[in-house]
């Protein structure tokens, strides 16, 4: 099957999932065409049966803000025509599903039917889509998609509640992970020694947007560090990084907080961690939490959104009340302070990731959906 995939290529969960999906589909024999304005951050320079098509955005004095959505629709139309795509799979409702609908209408004029599958990831529904400026077009784009998936039951329910799309069946297909890549035993202890030097390693990975509450991460770590020798590794970058750095200085822990910036291959880092912190106040799934669990890392997060569908509180980690950094730190100390409890949680985390979210279990769900869409 020839599949066109459009996603945001920047650092974040939706782009990571879309890219990993394309790579996995190519391994399974499909031909995958990525259509976006830049090469997705997890996409290697070359992979068999994968082609990247850049969207060129013209710069004209007439446009204060060049219309990317229109340029994307044109590029989708071009690639679908030239490569004879079987379907488009777009990640994020706007503008991707909107552009896909435009491309589909253009193709219909030539008698070509191109099914559109839209996957909803989170902020396209919970934040952007519910902004009054975008609500109507988000609803329209969802309802005009041939098939719609959501990465969690929480996100499905939120979509139906916010947009009243009762006539549109939303299928839940969760994010996935390759257990062979996120395997703690696959990586030696050299990186762990470098990061922690014998101390416990706490880790956070994100795009440092306000919703991630990265200062909460630093505050939790500071409380843990008072009881247990530890370091905090912060991976990624974004608008709140400076606030996290300032918080580390304010709390006097800056020497033990390491900001590594954006790193594409996070599996070796996660395999070196003892605990993963995810302090978002709105989380539709939590891909980084899943990847951490696959590496046998207990996860501490807030009990919001779709995260409880990923993390079993008390079994694979701990979920607390948003903003309760004291309670979160206490839970972290309880887990890290007991080798027996940590090992039990680590084993349970690995088991949950492989049993419920392994790529070989999730990919057939997408392939079945594609087959239905094409029929």
Image (cartoon, grey):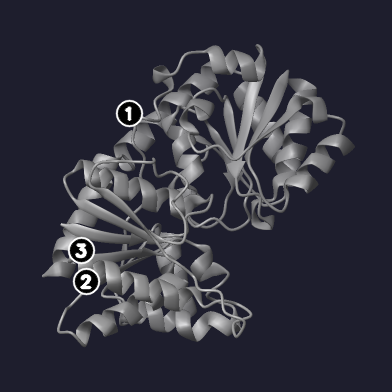
Q: Residue at x 39, y 25 (%)?
A: 183
Q: Residue at x 30, y 50 (%)?
A: 22
221 left or right, relative to 280: right
Is disc 3 placed on a helix, strand or loop?
helix
Whether pointer 3 and pointer 2 mark residues with C-beta atoms closer than 8 Å, the reply is yes
Viewer-closest of 308 and 123: 123
114 left or right, relative to 219: left
* Residue to which mark 2 is pinned: 81
* Residue to which mark 3 is pinned: 83
Q: Quadrant of residue 143?
A: bottom left
Give the percent coordinates (x, y) of residue 285: 47, 53
Numbered label attached to residue 180: 1
Is disc 2 placed on a helix, strand or loop?
helix
User: Which quadrant of the rendered structure holds the C terminus?
Assistant: bottom left
Q: Residues within 10 Å of mark 2 (few under 14, many from 20)?
A: some
Answer whether residue 312 is visible to the viewer in this image: no
Whether pointer 1 and pointer 3 mark residues with C-beta atoms closer than 8 Å, the reply is no
Q: Residue at x 35, y 70 (%)?
A: 75
Give the percent coordinates (x, y) of residue 308: 48, 49
Give the spatial CA distance, label 2 vs label 1: 37 Å
Give the percent coordinates (x, y) of residue 1: 15, 57
């Amino acid at each position: 099957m020839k599949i066109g995939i459009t996603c945001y290529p920047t650092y974040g969960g939706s782009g990571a999932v879309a890219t990993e999906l394309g790579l996995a589909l190519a391994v399974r024999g499909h031909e995958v065409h990525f259509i976006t304005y830049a090469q997705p951050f997890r996409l290697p320079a070359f992979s068999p049966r994968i082609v990247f098509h850049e969207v060129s955005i013209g710069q004209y004095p007439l446009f204060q803000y060049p219309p990317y959505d229109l340029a994307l629709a044109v590029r989708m139309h071009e690639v679908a025509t030239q490569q004879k795509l079987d379907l488009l799979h777009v990640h994020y409702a706007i503008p991707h599903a909107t552009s896909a609908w435009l491309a589909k209408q253009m193709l219909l004029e030539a008698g070509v039917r191109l099914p559109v599958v839209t996957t909803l990831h989170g902020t396209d529904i919970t934040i952007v889509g519910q902004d009054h400026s975008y609500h109507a077009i988000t609803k329209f784009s969802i309802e005009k998609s041939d098939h719609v998936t959501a990465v969690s039951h929480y996100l499905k329910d939120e979509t139906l509640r916010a947009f009243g799309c009762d006539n549109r069946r939303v299928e839940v297909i969760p994010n996935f992970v390759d257990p062979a890549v996120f395997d703690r035993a696959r990586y030696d202890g050299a990186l762990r020694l470098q990061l922690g030097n014998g101390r416990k390693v706490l880790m956070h990975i994100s795009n440092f947007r306000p919703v991630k509450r990265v200062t909460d991460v630093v505050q939790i770590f500071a409380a843990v560090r008072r009881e247990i020798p530890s370091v905090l590794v912060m991976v990624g970058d974004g608008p709140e990084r400076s606030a996290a750095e300032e918080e580390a200085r304010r709390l006097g822990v800056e020497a033990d907080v390491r900001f590594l910036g954006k790193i594409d291959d996070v599996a070796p880092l996660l395999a070196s961690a003892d605990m993963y912190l995810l302090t978002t106040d709105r989380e539709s799934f939590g891909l980084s939490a899943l990847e951490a669990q696959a590496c046998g890392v207990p996860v501490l997060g807030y009990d919001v959104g779709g995260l409880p569908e990923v993390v079993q509180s008390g079994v694979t980690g701990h979920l607390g009340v948003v903003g309760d950094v004291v309670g979160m730190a206490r839970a972290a100390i309880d887990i890290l302070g007991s080798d027996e409890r940590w090992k039990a949680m680590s084993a349970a985390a690995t088991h949950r990731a492989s049993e419920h979210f392994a790529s070989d279990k999730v990919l057939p769900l997408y392939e079945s959906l594609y087959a239905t869409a094409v029929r």
